[in-house]
């Protein structure tokens, strides 16, 4: 089995379904960021397309958060004493995001606050991603956690959830 490090985790030999846990989760982050940009660039009157895209974003985020909550966060809590506070913060942020996503899913695309609600979700996700990528992921990389095995678990579970 190949060992992935910070230096080679972005290797072009990785397939979209493979990689260490950080590579896979960052790939999800980029995908959601792209979707939010696409939403923001849509014309105001494209209510149906915006609603479909927003619902897709919510679905993608729910899978991503489930992966973190079921696999990554427990591994960090068990294997890293210095990252428990960051994990707990992530769990609380997920709870807040899930409430907002539930609201978005219940809204119609032509409601007055729909676009604003989706953009507030984008801001919350941007904050959460920044914390994960600047604080949590570097700690995980420096830890003794097997980021390749965690990546394999994430990939398997994502197939089940998708």
Image: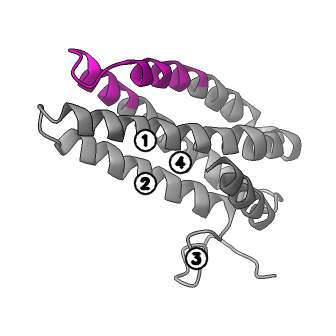
The span picked out in magenta is 95-121
Q: Which residue is mark 1?
A: 56
Q: Earlier in the sequence, mark 3 or mark 4?
A: 3
Distance in Å between CA atoms under marks 2 and 1: 11 Å
- Residue 82 to residue 107: above or below: below
- Please tell me whether mark 4 or mark 2 is closer to you in this view: 2
Q: Earlier in the sequence, mark 3 or mark 2?
A: 3
Q: Earlier in the sequence, mark 2 or mark 1?
A: 2
Q: Is residue 79 left or right of residue 93?
A: right
Residue 15: which disc?
A: 3
Q: Secondary structure at mark 1?
A: helix
Q: Which residue is mark 2?
A: 31
Residue at 65% over, 70% down: 19
Q: Position of residue 160 (x, y in %)?
A: 71, 52
Discs 4, 2 touching: Cβ within 8 Å: no
Most frequent secondary structure within the magenta stretch? helix
- Please tell me whether mark 4 or mark 1 is closer to you in this view: 1
Quarter where residue 68 is shown = top right
Distance in Å between CA atoms under marks 3 and 1: 23 Å
Q: Which residue is mark 4?
A: 134
Closest to the observer, 118 or 77 = 118
Q: Position of residue 98 (x, y in %)?
A: 54, 24
């Amino acid at each position: 089995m190949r060992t992935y490090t910070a230096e080679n985790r972005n290797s072009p030999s990785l397939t979209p379904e493979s990689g260490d846990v950080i590579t896979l989760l960052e790939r999800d982050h980029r995908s959601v960021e792209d979707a939010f940009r696409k939403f923001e660039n849509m014309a105001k009157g494209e209510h149906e397309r915006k609603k479909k895209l927003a619902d897709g974003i919510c679905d993608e985020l729910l899978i991503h958060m489930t992966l973190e909550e079921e696999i990554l966060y427990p591994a960090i809590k068990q294997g890293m004493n210095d990252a428990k506070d960051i994990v707990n913060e992530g769990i609380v942020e997920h709870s807040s995001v899930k409430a907002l996503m539930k609201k978005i899913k219940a809204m119609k695309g032509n409601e007055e606050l729909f676009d604003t609600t989706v953009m507030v979700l984008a801001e919350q996700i941007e904050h959460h991603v920044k914390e994960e990528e600047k604080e949590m992921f570097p700690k995980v990389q420096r830890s003794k956690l097997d980021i390749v095995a965690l990546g394999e678990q994430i990939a398997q579970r994502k197939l089940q959830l998708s």
